[in-house]
Image (spheres, helix red, strand yellow):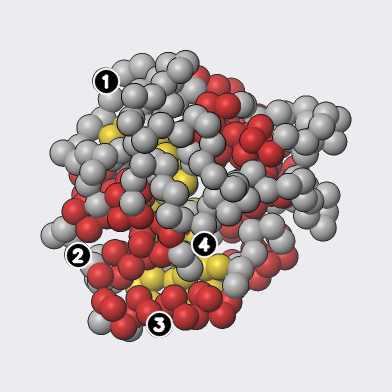
Amino acid sequence: MAQRFTTPFNPGSTAADVIAGVDLTGRRVIVTGATSGLGKETARVMASAGAEVTIAARNVQAADSTAREIANRTGNDRVSSGSLDLSDLDSVDAFVSDWSGPLDILVNNAGIMAPPEQRTSDGRELQFATNHLGHFRLTLGLHDALASAGKARVVVLSSVGHVNGPVRFDDPDFTKERYDPWLAYAQSKTANILFAVEAAARWAPDRIAVNALNPGRIWETGLGRHMDAPPASFDPSGKSGVTEKNTAQGAATSVLLAASPLVEGITGKYFEDCQEAGPYIPGVRRGVADYAIDPDNARALWDLSLKLSNADH
């Protein structure tokens, strides 16, 4: 791996630290799943820097309430909501159709983790459909809006959980083998990284930067609602390479990739703790697995995603 890209920030840096001094006035931003947790903090901080922010979420009432709250807290009245159910491709298409004009920043933040086996109306495994395919179709649908902005950025939230498994190209929906919630989660998070790798390569001429990230382990969000307690691998001491963060710290890497001038021109990378991640070392819950940044896997996933989402790009 070439020399990694670094920044002055660290695991304790907050989203507010990262965006200090950045003026986003005139920039248009969409954050998916921003009614709580990391998405809400990401949207709030970017609104505080003057951005026009759209809260895109399945629960429209919660999205409306969040938009009003952020507008009141930041004094920025350019915060709005939009209906978006990533597990429903018709909903994704409707959101895209409603969007007009350029888009400077898209933060693919929404996600689910390790639910009981569920499928979408078209038979897709729910985590792969929500975490990857919905965002895939959304981002492709917004490509022209991103391209028209000039120097647009797409930020894709993945997870260190991707190291638990690659994309199962021959059985992404667990129809041939028994469903495992954690393998399905790992697959979807690997897919997030591979999407960033391939989109970055394809869209470089359009000046669209696409990067993925691991926000860290943040138990105060709602992502772990299907879990009774942190998994056995959780290590508060940090000896395994993982320490628990609060929401402000967890959103820092998202905001860095979305808004900081420090990463201008950086694309196709995977970040953690506000730095480009190194290779994954077994036994240490950090870094990026080789299969998640493999260009052949990235191209194969793109083709599979086009087929599974019935997209035409």
Secondary structure of residue under mark 1: loop
* Whether residue 151 can be seen here: no
Q: Residues within 10 Å of mark 3 (few under 14, many from 20)?
A: some
Does residue 178 sit above or below 141 in this rendering?
above
Q: Which mark is in front, 4 or 2?
A: 4
The spot of residue 252 in percent (x, y) is 30, 50
The spot of residue 160 in percent (x, y) is 47, 33
Q: In the rendered structure, which disc, 1 or 4, sits on the residue that comes first in sequence? A: 1
* Occupied quadrant, residue 95: bottom right
Q: Amino acid at mark 2?
A: Asp
Q: Which mark, by number, is residue 23?
A: 2
**Which residue bears the numbered disc 4?**
33
Q: In the rendered structure, which disc, 4 or 2, sits on the residue that comes first in sequence? A: 2
Q: Which mark is in front, 1 or 4?
A: 4
Does residue 161 sit above or below 257 in this rendering?
above
What is the CA distance from the residue labelled 4 to the residue labelled 3?
A: 16 Å
Position of the N terminus by quadrant: top left
Secondary structure of residue under mark 2: loop
**Which residue bears the numbered disc 1?**
3
Q: Residue furthest right?
A: 176
The spot of residue 306 in percent (x, y) is 69, 44
Q: Which residue is at a point 22% across and 32% down the rendered structure image?
A: 6
**Which residue bears the numbered disc 3?**
68
Q: Amino acid at mark 4?
A: Gly
What is the CA distance from the residue labelled 1 to the residue labelled 2?
A: 30 Å
Q: Residues within 10 Å of mark 2 (few under 14, many from 20)?
A: some
Q: In the rendered structure, which disc, 2 or 3, sits on the residue that comes first in sequence? A: 2
* Whether residue 64 can be seen here: yes
Secondary structure of residue under mark 4: loop
Q: Residues within 10 Å of mark 4 (few under 14, many from 20)?
A: many
